[in-house]
Amino acid sequence: MSYQLILPLDRCTDRRILCRQGSKVSVSSRRSHPSGEQASQRSDRNGRPPPKINFFKLVVATRAWHRMARKSSMRSEKVIAKPTLKLENTYRTEPEDGQVFMPTRVENMLKETLERKLKPVKYTPDGCRIIATELTADIKSKVKAMEFPRYKIVCNVIITENKRQGLEIASRCIWNKDTDNFASYTYRNPSLIAVANVYGVYFE
């Protein structure tokens, strides 16, 4: 048993047909032109109209796709870290023969570095502050390149103006006199005085 309902509509409006077959109810809609001709609609192979695209759903889907692409690129860029090696403690309390901190080698390096760096320099508070920082890093890296095993290196550079004044610099350290030592060098030119101290402390 089937029922068919046709609703009267004005022109340029929808013509709706309600059909009932058994327990199934379907509603169809068609739009007519003022001239009476029906507008053609695109359909797929089964005759169904194409689905409507929601703008907000499209934006959400695009953002989700960008997030997934970014995560996949980050995951591919990750480098597998190598496991760290844990070395057993040697319980060594003194350096081996020939591997003791040598002040003479360090003082020769200090003399060469300070003369090369400070010979053309005139004293200015801001400029010498930067130069002292650069000299400290340079000297420390050169002492480490001398390869004194298990030694902690401490470097200090002081630059002051040369006005023929008296200057005294003192330092005190608590260390082992048999293994620890220091090197010092003072450089002068007509404009400034520079004092560089390097301390080598054996790490037991």
Image (cartoon, rainbow, N blue to C red):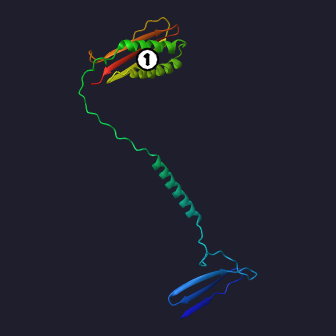
When the figure is inspected, residue 32 is found, relative to residue 204, above or below; the finding is below
Left or right of 192: which side holds 29? Answer: right
**Kind of residue indicated by mark 1:** Val
Residue located 40% across and 9% down the image: 168
Image quadrant containing the C terminus: top left
**Residue at the (53%, 55%) spot, across then down:** 66
Kindly give the residue lying farthest to the front in the view shown.
Answer: 98
Q: Is the residue 117 above or below the residue 86 in the image?
A: above
Residue 32: quadrant of the picture: bottom right
Q: Position of residue 132 (x, y in %)?
A: 47, 19
Residue 124, position in %: x, y? Answer: 54, 16
Outermost residue toward the bottom? 1
* Residue at the image point whose x is 26% and y is 33% from the top: 88
Q: What residue is shown with label 1?
A: 157
Left or right of residue 102: residue 36: right
Give the mark count.
1
Residue 195 in view (yes/no):
no
Residue 37 in the image, given as x and y percentages of width and height = 73, 81
The residue sitting at 45% across, 49% down in the picture is 75
Describe the element under mark 1 as helix, strand or loop: strand
Where in the figure is residue 128, as x and y percent of width and height? 51, 17
Position of residue 69 relative to residue 186, above or below, is below
Task: Please tell me in which quadrant of the rendered image residue 203 appears.
Answer: top left
Write down the quadrant of residue 4 in the picture. bottom right
Crowding at dot 1, Cα within 10 Å, few <14 / some 14-19 / many 20+, comes out as: many
Q: Nearer the viewer, residue 76 or 62?
A: 76
Query: Can residue 124 be seen in the rendering of this structure?
Result: yes
Outermost residue on the right side: it is 35
